[in-house]
Image (cartoon, grey):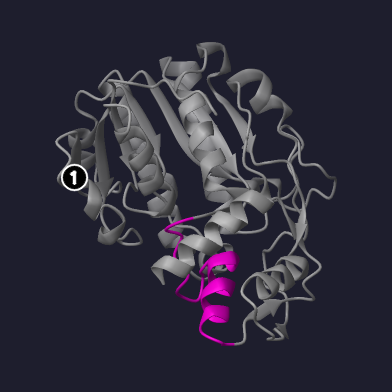
Amino acid sequence: MVERNLKNKKILITGGAGFIGSNLCEELLKYENKVVCFDNFSTGKRENIISFLKNPNFTLIEGDIRNYEDCEKAVKGVDYVLHQAAWGSVPRSIEMPLFYEEVNIKGQLNMLEAARQNNVKKFIYASSSSVYGDEPNLPKKEGTEGNLLSPYALTKKTNEEYARLYSKLYKLDTYGLRYFNVFGKRQDPDGAYAAVIPKFIKLLLNDKQPTINGNGKQSRDFTYIENVIEANLKACMAPSSASGEAFNIAFGGREYLIDIYYALTKALNKDIEPVFVPDRPGDIKHSNADITKAKKMLGYNPQWSFQDGITEAINWYKDNL
């Protein structure tokens, strides 16, 4: 069992009604923390947090990270900020670069400044494995990044640089978590830009034929949500000597998309072949994380393998779709 001893704190979770954010809210409420969820519901869902609304330790603030006054309001009296609010999806960012600049870069800068002005103890934020770009070597290791391949990746790399500056110039403790293909309960299976695992599961449960971009031979370090929760809590308890850094957050495994697809068909007892379509622009072919730095500096010790996580995820979607 992972030690999670963050108790009796006031914690702000931006994007708290989203997939990762709502799972963080749920975990932190277990330990008598006061949790503030800050969301504008552009991608978050009210049903993700409806079970928390009657909890006296839970506060919902509807607002937008692009509005500095909203950010100021949200951080009042907060010990820690877990900044998860952002727009994801590499292909969507290629279509909407100006929007991604506004939300992902200006939004995080607003939150950093509000945190600084209100003496927040630690600022933990979501980065992404996309910052590795076209770097071909595996496993991916912090400090060896390639050319960025999408506006989304650029926003995340810019987030890291701003956080590093805030740590150096203003002594705000910042910790960047480079998530690798997170999956698990409450992840949205719908929409053109939905993550692949919930999308596959929903289509197969409905006897529909999923689409795979490319030949399915691309590989990913799929990371179960419980490992991401652990990383956020460990960052809250990390020493200031780790401030200003970014860390790979993954299990350290490597799964091929086509293998995952056929494992899902077997688990769901479906005999449906996928449709193969061209590669998506900006996608990274292979990702596998070296998590040594997070283990050493944050005490990160992921407990959930891909196999354990996918079993839990399948069961959740069976019950909730």
Residue 191: within the magenta?
yes
State yes or no: residue 316 in magenta. no
Say whether residue 66 is left or right of residue 275: left
Quadrant of the image occupied by residue 214: bottom right
Q: Image point 68% across, 86% down: which residue?
A: 272
Magenta segment range? 185-208
Residue located 24% across and 51% down the image? 51
Residue 246 picture location, percent across and down: 60, 31
Residue closest to the eye, 239 or 207: 207
Q: Is residue 12 left or right of residue 286?
A: left
Residue 82 to residue 305: above or below: above
Q: Is residue 282 above or below residue 233?
A: below
Would you place residue 301 above or below residue 190 in this image?
above
Residue 126 in the image: state x and y as whole percent: 49, 41
Counting from the top left corner in percent of width and height, residue 61 is at 18, 45
Instruction: Tell me if I can see residue 162 in this picture.
Output: no
Mark 1 — residue?
61
Q: Nearer the viewer, residue 81 or 73?
A: 81
Of the pair 101 and 36, the residue shown nearer to us: 36
> In the rendered view, would you say 249 is above or below 63?
above
Secondary structure state at the residue bearing disc 1: strand
